[in-house]
Image (cartoon, coloured by chain):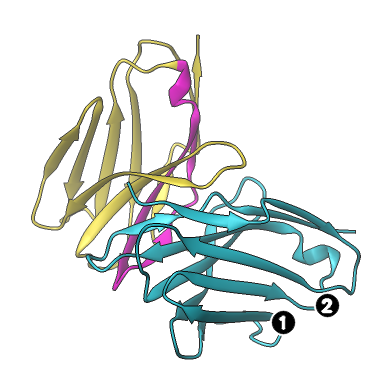
Amino acid sequence: GAVVSQHPSRVICKSGTSVKIECRSLDFQATTMFWYRQFPKQSLMLMATSNEGSKATYEQGVEKDKFLINHASLTLSTLTVTSAHPEDSSFYICSAVSSVDEQFFGPGTRLTVL
Amino acid sequence: SQQGEEDPQALSIQEGENATMNCSYKTSINNLQWYRQNSGRGLVHLILIRSNEREKHSGRLRVTLDTSKKSSSLLITASRAADTASYFCATGANSKLTFGKGITLSVRP
């Protein structure tokens, strides 16, 4: 099946710093990518829809200035957690949608904010 | 409460036994999907069942859908230790998915 990668897989940062997470579709183009957050032993919560060439659409309660999304090409979306705080520590997962509406998930990025 | 509520929330069985997991949802759907997630990893798509389908098979997996009851079940037959994971149902439109809380399945060798 299609492959979606995320980088980095793990990141530890100090409170107040910004962290960028990349999501790449490796063998297909994705007009739409999604970003999810998952707290321990909980389900995935959709944060935002990333659309190539346009602004991201954020879910209710997700601060767009806090979680900056850039979908600059058909194979790359980035999520930047700005001024990260310990409560932002979570597992961030992206997914990419192919031209035939199949959705493939990345392996996730574990963010720990000290 | 969330669209897509699975039960039980945790299930422990012996290798070789069958595992049945249920999911209920609240709104009308076009399809329902089941995913597996190994600890600390991303999601693996298992199976999609459309609203006009009642049952679907894929290897050791059997999924049923009852739109009148707004529920679905995932059956894993002849379970293996490697089936140990969390299982989520998901519904959605236009690729935008809403996940249930998940079921943690432990298969004892």
Q: Is residue B100 magenta?
A: yes
Is B34 rendered above or below residue A75? above
In which chain is the residue bearing label 1?
A: A
Residue in the picture at 15% in, 39% down: B56
Label 2 Cα crowd, 10 Å radius (few <14 / some 14-19 / many 20+): some
Image quadrant assignment for residue A104: bottom left
Q: Nearer the viewer, residue A74 or A82?
A: A74
- Quarter of image, res A20: bottom right
Q: Which residue is mark 2?
A: A83
Badge 2 and badge 1 in a common chain = yes
Q: Colour of chain B?
A: yellow
- Residue A107 numbered tag: none
Chain A drawn colour: cyan
Mark toward the start of the polypeptide (2 vs 1)? 1
Is A65 situated left or right of A72 in this image?
A: right
Query: What secondary structure prevails in the magenta region?
Result: strand
Category of crowding for the residue at label 1, using alpha-carbon neighbours closer than 10 angstroms: few (below 14), some (14–19), many (at least 20) = some
Q: Position of residue A106 (x, y in %)?
A: 50, 54
Question: Circles 2 and 1: CB distance less than 8 Å?
Answer: yes
The chain identifier of the residue carrying mark 2 reads A
The residue range painted magenta reads: B81-104
